[in-house]
Image (cartoon, helix red, strand yellow):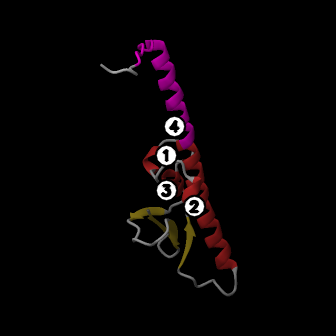
Amino acid sequence: MFGFSKTYSTPSAEQLDELSVRVKNADKQKSEADCAYLLNQFNKLLVESVELDKSANLDNKFSHKVYIDESKLNYWLNLDKCVGTKYDPLNQMKNVGVKVKFHKKTYDDKIHIEYIKADKQINFSS
């Protein structure tokens, strides 16, 4: 009936297990890299906010914003994957007394995080 049909043999359970482990490990490494990048951006935001306040011209600025480079992320922003890891931005911010609030970004806005200095709050637009 079909002139170019090919017969496939079923892989062994061991081969499928090995593939599953490799994929899970690769996924974990990519997620960890994303979490490390996001934590670094949160820390950058806070450090720059403190440094800007030391400047004579910018000491009354209400907030400071840092943009997220989406090309440096493996996955869409999912901070839930970071919970409980050593690169957990939400836990790190909680430890220094900073609240994190999530906002839906507007149509043409880039993904960013903004530190509202008076409220010790990071607004995360994604």
Residue 98: numbered disc: none
Tell me, yes or no, whether the highlighted magenta stretch contains residue 23.
yes
Closer to us: 107 or 36:
107
Q: Secondary structure at mark 1?
A: helix
- What's the CA distance linking mark 4 and mark 3? 26 Å
Which comes sooner in the sequence, label 1 or label 2? Answer: 2
Counting from the top left corner in percent of width and height, residue 45 is at 59, 66
* Residue range (magenta): 6-30
Q: Answer with mark 1 or mark 3, whichever residue precedes in sequence.
A: 1
Give the crowd class for mark 3: few <14, some 14-19, many >=20 residues within 10 Å.
few
Badge 2 amino acid = Asp
Q: Nearer the viewer, mark 2 or mark 3?
A: 2
Tell me the quarter of the image containing the N terminus. top left
Query: Looking at the image, which is closer to me, 84 or 35?
Result: 35
Q: Residue at x 69, y 86 (%)?
A: 56
Callout 4: helix, strand or loop?
Answer: helix
The amino acid sitting under disc 3 is Lys
Q: Which mark is residue 69?
A: 2
Nearer the observer: mark 4 or 3; the answer is: 4
Q: Earlier in the sequence, mark 4 or mark 2?
A: 4
Real-space CA distance between mark 1 and mark 4, rounded to the nearest whole angstrom:
12 Å
